[in-house]
Image (spheres, rainbow, N blue to C red):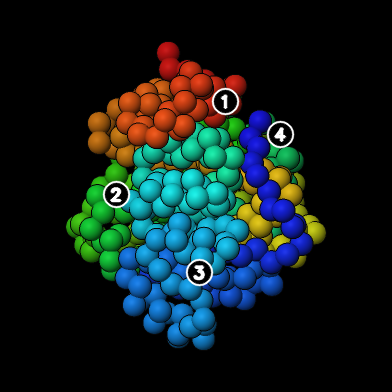
Amino acid sequence: MTTFKTLTDPTAPVRIIQVGAGGMGRVWLQLLLESPDVDLVGLVDLDTEAARRVLTELGRSDVLVGSSISEVAEAASAHAVVNVTVPVAHHPVNIEAMFAGLPVLCEKPIAPTVSQAFSLAAASEATGQLLMTSQSRRYYPVLTDFKTSLQSLGEVGIATTEFFMAPHFGGFRDSMDQPLLIDMSIHAFDVARYLLDADPVSVYCDSYNPSWSWYAGDAATTALFEFDGGIRYTFVGSWCSPGLETSWNGSWRVSGSAGSASWDGETKPSVDIGAAPSHPTATAVNSTPETIAGSLAEFIDSIRTGRVPSGEVHSNVLSLAMVEAAVESSSSGQRVFIESLLETSYHHAVAAEQRPEVLTSLLGWGSARAGLQISNIDTAP
């Protein structure tokens, strides 16, 4: 069972340092500054002058700025870290923070690769510090309603997501090999796991780049996953499709033996069980924070109470594995089995680990299945 250290005083504001002052970093800074549960005490960035400018613009030039997590954390008496760096920096930043004695809330993906995610999970065990991914798109009351509505569908066997948008980000996404799969699809894949209460078994994926795309890498994809129990989940998406765009959560349909349910990613879901369509009644969770505010609220609750959050690193690895398996399938043109990818990544993690404490933890697992406490994932034939 996952356990981690909690705060000594569960009632005091959580003293947080943020790492990363870029575009998404500004959004997080605004949230942290507005939260009554948080005292923003530090901002870490390699470009300290840029970090100071951002804080000045936000009216908080009193916040300590530096380029070292450990130094800023000690000087500011920090309780926790929010990691909003680029994905390639997630592993070193999370490692430094946890070994400095600080729990971490990290923007997705938790790491660029599954093997690095295993290293982080083992480091969380070795340090006793919580590492949580901000899977911010789990935090929608209407998503909870949608999940509840699936109970009326009988045996669920088919789920689909359509995701069509045309954002012009600029920056690192434009030059990525797989911008849609690597940077965005994990949200939908993670929600699919949440909705289906099942683990992925395998995937066949085809990714490509339409001729008019402004991305260097593949901005469109179709991925067909098999989940436990034979459930099929299909993700069809594009990041270069202007017109008739879906919501950022995509458009969902789930079919079962007794009927079907749909959700446009924003409004209340619809259910049809063979009679008149119905709309589930909104539940009490409608008062809970949404998106990254929901991630922050669950993180703070976890480090105060010890409750394991939904984005805890061990449980999040399978969502990342879905992404990596889809990329591998697209590259190879073959069906990829999730457990095979997990075990290969586990051995890579063991071979690459530099910290003795983390290596000891990894070796103690014996296998990826044991380390992630997976008991029901199907195996390849």
At numbered mark 3, what does the secondary structure look like: helix, strand or loop? strand
Q: Is residue 79 above or below residue 231?
A: below
Q: Is residue 167 above or below residue 184?
A: below
Inspect the image, locate mark 2, and give the three-letter code of the amino acid beneath it.
Gln
Of the image marks 1 and 2, the number of the one nearer the N terminus? 2
- Residue 193, by quadrant, is top right
CB within 8 Å, label 4 to label 2: no
Circle 1 residue? 374
Of the image marks 1 and 4, the number of the one nearer the N terminus? 4
Of the image marks 4 and 3, the number of the one nearer the N terminus? 3
Of the image marks 3 and 2, the number of the one nearer the N terminus? 3
**Along the horizontal axis of the image, is 334 left or right of 259?**
left
Inspect the image, locate mark 4, and give the three-letter code of the amino acid beneath it.
Gly
4 or 3: mark nearer the eye: 3
4 or 2: mark nearer the eye: 2
Cα separation between marks 4 and 3: 51 Å
3 or 2: mark nearer the eye: 3
Q: In front here: 273 or 223?
A: 223
Circle 3 residue? 42
Quarter of the image with the N terminus in it: top right
Inspect the image, locate mark 3, and give the three-letter code of the amino acid beneath it.
Gly
Mark 1 residue crowding within 10 angstroms, few (<14) / some (14–19) / many (20+): few
1 or 3: mark nearer the eye: 3
At numbered mark 2, what does the secondary structure look like: helix, strand or loop? loop
Of the image marks 1 and 3, the number of the one nearer the N terminus? 3
At numbered mark 1, what does the secondary structure look like: helix, strand or loop? loop
Inspect the image, locate mark 1, and give the three-letter code of the amino acid beneath it.
Ile
Circle 2 residue? 178
Circle 4 residue? 154
Q: Kindly identify the residue that appears in the image at 73 percent across and 65 percent down.
A: 12
Q: Kindly identify the residue that appears in the image at 30 percent across and 60 percent down.
A: 173
Q: In front here: 358 or 298?
A: 358
